[in-house]
Amino acid sequence: MSTGSNAGRVFRTLGRASARVRWRHLLGAALAVVALLLAAAIGWVAAAVVVALLVVASLAVDSVEIVQAYERRPYTVLGRYDGTLGPGINFVLPLVTETHVFDTRTQMIEVPTQEAITQDNSPVRASAVVYLRVVDAEKTFLEVEAYRQAVAYLAQTSLRAVIGDMELDDTLSRREEMNDRIHDQLGDTVAEWGVDVEAVEVKAVMPSDGVVTAMERQTAAERHRRAMILEAQGARQAAIERAVGDKQAAVLRSEGRKRASVLEAQGDATATVLRARAAEAMGERAIIERGFEAIERVGRGAATTYVVPQELTALVGRYGRHLTGGGSGGGLDSLGVDLAYLDFEDVVETPADADEVEIEID
């Protein structure tokens, strides 16, 4: 039973292989035509020799597989997977070996624009690009058919699912998170196919026209609100600055008035003191002059002992100290009284607590 099944499988494989048009089939048909022509021209024996040589040459060519450095080629022999050809020259069984080429370089798959609904029921259109690379040609050959289309369809589904789990604002601002989520969903599935997803980039997320219009109105309103806030803050700051300026100006004016009043009061006080001192000096001068006149009248008399008032003696003492440089002049200094003509050698003062002074004149 198993032998019959194997034989049937081989015949089915040969049938499918015969249904495919390959270059070796065309070469066989060309050799048959050439053999008929040679047989008609030079005879069947010579034609058979030439055909045999051509068949051997075609088999030799068909047994050589040249693989590029960036390629891997899984191959089957009579429909059975038999290995993977690496870069360089490889020899396989002719006629019964079939190879499949896989490019191991990074490939780009563009995900077409998808329409989806966000979590907050906003319709959007999104597109993306997937970068992938075949890392295991055997798995890619055995596990999936047309791996590029499979990855593209899976990326479309993942893109719609990720958008459905996010709100509109997040789809527009959190692009990196979308890329990572789509990459994780693709990576777990395509790894079983021998394919590695290197990166996923969401190219664009565009809301519908109605949503775009609403967003533009919202943006304009937000900018108007910020402008009004800035204008109010500017007016408030200007009012504060004006108030501070007015306060400082009032303080300076008050300080100026205060200083002016102080200076005016000081001037009045100084003038009053000076007037008082001048009056005092004038009074002392008058007393001295009267005293001198009295002394002069007394001097004309015949007495030898006289009584002089204490105030006159104190004034004469002050002038005497001024004349001898013993101290600073009193109030009479500024009056310019010249007492150099007086002779005070005969003046005899009484004790300090006496009210009168006796002066003897020879």
Image (cartoon, rainbow, N blue to C red):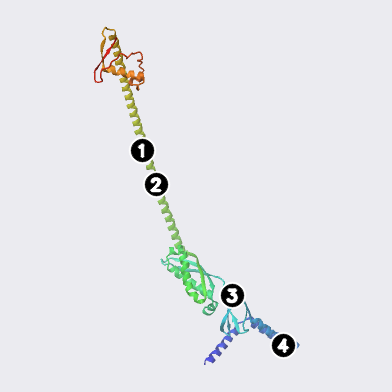
* Number of marks in picture: 4
Residues 276 and 38: in front is: 276
The image's mark for residue 237 is 2
Q: CA distance from mark 2 to mark 3?
A: 72 Å
Q: Earlier in the sequence, mark 1 or mark 3?
A: 3
**Amino acid type for the residue under numbered disc 4:** Val
Q: Earlier in the sequence, mark 2 or mark 3?
A: 3
Q: Earlier in the sequence, mark 4 or mark 3?
A: 4
Report x, y in % for residue 178.
46, 67
Q: Residues within 10 Å of mark 3 (few under 14, many from 20)?
A: some
Report x, y in % for residue 238.
40, 45
Q: Is residue 210 left or right of residue 62?
A: left
The image's mark for residue 71 is 3
Whether pointer 1 and pointer 4 mark residues with C-beta atoms closer than 8 Å, the reply is: no
Q: Is residue 91 left or right of residue 249?
A: right
**Amino acid type for the residue under numbered disc 2:** Gln
Q: Residues within 10 Å of mark 2 (few under 14, many from 20)?
A: few
Q: Residues within 10 Å of mark 1 (few under 14, many from 20)?
A: few
The residue indicated by pointer 4 is 49
Report x, y in % for residue 254.
35, 36
User: Circle 1 sits in a helix, a strand or a loop, which is it?
Assistant: helix
User: Circle 2 sits in a helix, a strand or a loop, which is it?
Assistant: helix
The residue indicated by pointer 1 is 251
Residues 293 and 236: in front is: 293
Q: Is residue 61 above or below residue 158?
A: below
Residue at point 59%, 75% (across, down)? 71
Q: CA distance from mark 1 to mark 3?
A: 90 Å
- The quadrant where residue 320 appears: top left
Residue at point 47%, 74% (across, down)? 188
Which residue is most to the bottom? 1
Residue at point 57%, 86% (across, down)? 13
Residue at point 35%, 35% (across, down)? 255
